[in-house]
Image: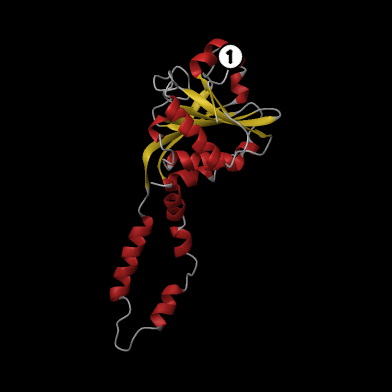
């Protein structure tokens, strides 16, 4: 399901609720001899049934949170990370998104992830082990819109190589916020370059972004160099 379809489908309820007196107006316009309620009730029930149908996503996704306060008490990286909620429909996504803190409201040191269900946002996860990540950087408090656009692109399967996507994480630090897009097969340069270019275009991000292999990051930490750039 495309991003535009996602957005349109989420506007259904809003459109249906714009004019609560619509049925009264229709009743007033009934032709002489027409019985109000018979066909109209059936029609309204059908419409109501269509509106209430959930809009399933191609994959289920899980939000994870790494609490900065818990991090300092843990000896092993990632041990403070907890799954928050798994969603599988557009309605569930919006319900969650509208009731959770956006990056600008998260505490410094927090990491908030959205990954395909059953993929843990860790280098050690079998699906992530041979992968890498693209990263974009924003000034403190400026990543909210880009985080939302990234999430919609993920759950809407917007990328040409969407099967390569593991998930995304937004990291809040003292002076900046970073959004990283994790992928499966770092050595597939064609797929990774395509994802990087599409993501930049989606975010309207003008600066050069780089792709780091997880393997390099594990060995070299902050000394890891970009393998690809777009």
- Whether residue 40 appears in this view of the structure is yes
Expressed as whole percent of the image width and height from the top left, the position of residue 125 reads 42, 20
Expressed as whole percent of the image width and height from the top left, the position of residue 71 reads 59, 20
In the figure, residue 219 lies in which quadrant? Answer: top right
Front residue of 219/27: it is 219
Q: Residue furthest bottom?
A: 32
Front residue of 215/90: it is 215
Expressed as whole percent of the image width and height from the top left, the position of residue 88 reads 39, 41
Q: Residues within 10 Å of mark 1 (few under 14, many from 20)?
A: few
Q: Is residue 105 above or below residue 134?
A: below
Q: Which residue is mark 1?
A: 221
Numbered-mark total: 1
Residue at x-position 47% and y-position 57%:
11
In the figure, residue 179 lies in which quadrant? Answer: top right
In the rendered image, the quadrant that contains the C terminus is top right
Expressed as whole percent of the image width and height from the top left, the position of residue 186 reads 45, 22
């Amino acid at each position: 399901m495309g991003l535009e379809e996602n957005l349109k489908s989420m506007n259904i309820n809003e459109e249906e609720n714009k004019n609560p007196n619509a049925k009264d107006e229709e009743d007033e316009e009934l032709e002489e001899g027409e019985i109000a309620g018979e066909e109209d009730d059936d029609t309204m029930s059908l419409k109501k049934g269509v509106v209430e149908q959930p809009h399933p996503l191609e994959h289920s996704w899980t939000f994870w949170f790494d609490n900065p306060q818990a991090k300092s008490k843990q000896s092993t990286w990632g041990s403070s990370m907890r799954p928050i909620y798994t969603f599988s429909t557009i309605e569930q996504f919006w319900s969650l998104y509208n009731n959770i803190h956006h990056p600008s409201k998260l505490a410094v040191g927090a990491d908030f992830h959205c990954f395909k269900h059953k993929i843990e946002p860790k280098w050690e996860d079998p699906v992530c082990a041979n992968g890498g990540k693209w990263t974009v950087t924003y000034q403190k408090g400026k990543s909210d819109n880009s985080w939302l656009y990234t999430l919609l692109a993920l759950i809407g399967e917007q990328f040409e190589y969407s099967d390569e996507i593991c998930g995304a994480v937004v990291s809040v630090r003292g002076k900046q916020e970073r959004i990283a897009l994790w992928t499966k097969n770092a050595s597939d340069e064609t797929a990774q370059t395509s994802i990087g270019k599409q993501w930049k275009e989606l975010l309207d991000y003008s600066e050069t972004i780089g792709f780091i292999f997880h393997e390099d990051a594990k060995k070299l930490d902050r000394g890891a160099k970009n393998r690809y750039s777009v």
